[in-house]
Image (cartoon, rainbow, N blue to C red):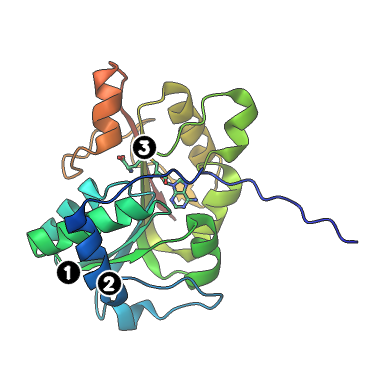
Amino acid sequence: MEKKIKEIKSYVLRAGRMSPAQRASYEELYKDYSIEFQNNYIDLESVFPGKDVIVEIGFGMGDATWQIAKDNPDKGYIGIEVHTPGVGKLLHQMKTNNVWNIRVIEHDAVEVIEKLFNNESVSGVHIFFPDPWPKKKHHKRRLVQKDFIEKILRVLKKDGYIYAVTDWEEYAEQMLDVLSSIDSLYNPYKGYATAQDWRPRTKFETKGLDKKHKINEVLFRKN
Ligand SMILES: C[S@@+](CC[C@H](N)C(=O)[O-])C[C@H]1O[C@@H](n2cnc3c(N)ncnc32)[C@H](O)[C@@H]1O
């Protein structure tokens, strides 16, 4: 019998409850403001006609997502997250703050990038405070590694950007090393990027700052 190889995932699904308001927003809005995972490329032009599309991977509770989308009504945002309460929270924030240029995808971002987005269809990718997987034996679960970045590169437009931020020093070094090692990317900064003042603080950034962690940012563009 063929043995199924267990895929290494970058996340562990956590339990978590939604508040009644988040649950109500989820039930009301999910249908119209989500994209279902599928094995075919979707037409982003029909999702966000005439808009550049920015993808956020692992948006958590979506704090940065809705605020950036609100500040940039000329762009379309796709947030990918596996944690259902976070999806409920973001949909609730969209309703509360009247921000509608966001679609959520509740699925593994690695599969979404691979299966859903056409070549050179995305203008930017945000990865804010990805799980650091600090133990060496878990490093293979980290999202920012060459294989996944190469998948992102396929969907990224020329001059599109990858912007990743972490409070985990040694993961930041890995991010810089991985992105620097890819010929089709260039770094407009010397080493780490200067803090982007348009990025709102996220829940995990606050946790890192409380522990006195340094925040490092990397921002590379596609040649
Ligand atoms: C440490 S949290 C950071 C959340 C948020 N960006 C922040 O800064 O507060 C990482 C998030 O990424 C999500 N995540 C990890 N791997 C993922 C994947 N492959 N696809 C979608 N979401 C993922 C987790 O569920 C979690 O919510």
Residue 27 at what x, y percent from top left? 26, 69
What's the residue at 27%, 57% (across, down)?
88
What's the residue at 31%, 21% (across, down)?
214
Q: Label 3 vs label 1: CA separation? A: 24 Å
Taking 90 as reference, is 16 left or right?
Answer: right
Q: Nearer the viewer, mark 3 or mark 2?
A: 2
Q: Residues within 10 Å of mark 3 (few under 14, many from 20)?
A: many
Question: Which residue is identified by label 2?
Answer: 33
Q: Residue furthest front?
A: 20
Q: Residue 168's quadrant in the figure?
A: top left
Mark 3 beta carbon near ligand 1 (under 8 Å): yes
Question: Which residue is identified by label 3?
Answer: 129
Q: Is residue 222 visible?
A: yes
Question: Which residue is identified by label 1?
Answer: 100
Q: Is residue 69 visible?
A: no
Mark 1 beta carbon near ligand 1 (under 8 Å): no
Residue 83 at what x, y percent from top left? 39, 51
What's the residue at 31%, 35% (across, down)?
193
Q: Label 3 vs label 2: CA separation? A: 24 Å
Residue 119 at what x, y percent from top left? 50, 71
What's the residue at 27%, 32% (across, down)?
205
Can you tell me which quadrant of the image ligand 1 is in? top left
The quarter in which the C terminus is drawn is bottom left
In the foreground, 78 or 9: 9
Q: Are marks 3 and 1 in contact (CB under 8 Å)?
A: no
Q: Are marks 2 and 1 in contact (CB under 8 Å)?
A: yes
Taking 31 as reference, is 64 left or right?
Answer: left
